Amino acid sequence: MTAVHLGFPRVPGTRGSSGVPSAPRPDHPGLLDQFGRVATDLRVSLTDRCNLRCTYCMPAEGLDWMPGEQVLSDDELVRLMRIAVETLGVTDIRLTGGEPLLRRGLEDIVARITALEPRPRVSMTTNGIGLAKRAKGLADAGLDRINVSLDTVDRALFEQITRRDRLSHVLAGLAAARDAGLAPVKVNSVLMRGINEHEAVPLLRFCLDEGYHLRFIEQMPLDAQHGWNRGEMITAEEILSMLGEEFSLSPFPAARGGAPAERWLVDGGPGDVGVIASVTRPFCSACERTRLTADGAVRSCLFSNDETDLRALVRAGARDEEVADAWRATMWGKLAGHEINEAGFAQPIRPMSAIGG
């Protein structure tokens, strides 16, 4: 069972469950950690459910989904996002899953978030199934942009990877998002050795032709089966080498900042491609993210095995400032890095579909 703590500040001079020496936290209103980072980017999982069964994420039969009463209600969800924005300084909110399009009332949730003051930038990561019918409504509700997961443009291979014959739906969703002005439309792709690494060049050609922004993501140890194998992962170096055989890549001129993707101009631009190398080129030192699961647990890191149960505080009648203090304390205990490349690394018990991307 995942370790959960109540999130109140630990006693100065002791070591918390994360192993980080607990120094006294300064009087800072935001989500500060002991390494000087301030989290302003909130990733919010709306559901752990998904309508695909991607081989690198979950088994063919799916998972035992969270019971409905465990999932945050719309009001609880919006309240926590209001606290994040108004009290804790969050400026960007990314809606994730599972598959966020499976959340009932999604458009209303988006409208309520974008009505917050100051207005946060709101984006969403989706597999694109059902997006074709809803892209305009989401844009009208205030959604700013969208990321769509797509690991191949080959129909048979798509079905092999996702265990569903739904490529045409994803492509239609991408086009609808572009037409609705959810720009930039980004495509997230995971390459796997012996399965789809040959798709690197076709994926980039497709995105350049359609005006989408491609981001390759190194496969991470977040699968429900805990079967991740470093040797099966296609590294950033390999991805760039494959692309370099067909395209001229040059460093993107703008500063990366806290963005997870390293970017390169393709054939001099204006098109570009990014690589998110969480495993081989960690960017933890610039991390600006905090995460909220669909059942109301806040996590300081995607790979954390500690989390704070904000849902329990909310349902027990905690005041906004008490919730905010618990959130601050969680981020204060954040490790310097995810430690994937350390001998003692332990894969999170929760799979990606439960944590939220």
Image (cartoon, helix red, strand yellow):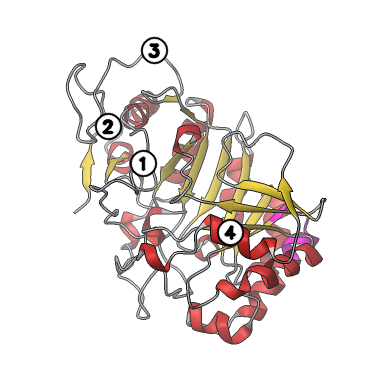
Image quadrant containing the N terminus: bottom left
- Are the residues at dot 3 and dot 1 in contact (C-beta closer than 8 Å)? no
Measured as percent of width and height from the top left, residue 199 is found at: 62, 73
Q: Which residue is mark 3?
A: 27
- Are the residues at dot 2 and dot 4 in contact (C-beta closer than 8 Å)? no
Dot 1, how many residues are within 10 Å of its Cα: few (below 14), some (14-19), or many (20+)?
A: many
Q: Which mark is residue 7?
A: 2
Q: Which residues are magenta?
A: 176-185
Nearest to viewer (mark 2 / mark 4): 4
Gap between marks 3 and 1, in whole Å? Answer: 21 Å
Q: Which residue is mark 1?
A: 298
Taking 300 as reference, is 7 left or right? Answer: left
Res. 181 visible in picture: yes
Gap between marks 2 and 4, in whole Å? Answer: 34 Å
Q: Earlier in the sequence, mark 3 or mark 2?
A: 2
Relative height, residue 160 to residue 276 (above, below): below
Residue drawn at 75 percent across, 68 percent down:
205
Q: Tag 4's secondary structure?
A: strand
Q: Earlier in the sequence, mark 1 or mark 2?
A: 2
Relative height, residue 207 to residue 90 (above, below): below
Q: Which residue is mark 4?
A: 216
**Camera-nearest residue between 322 and 270:** 270
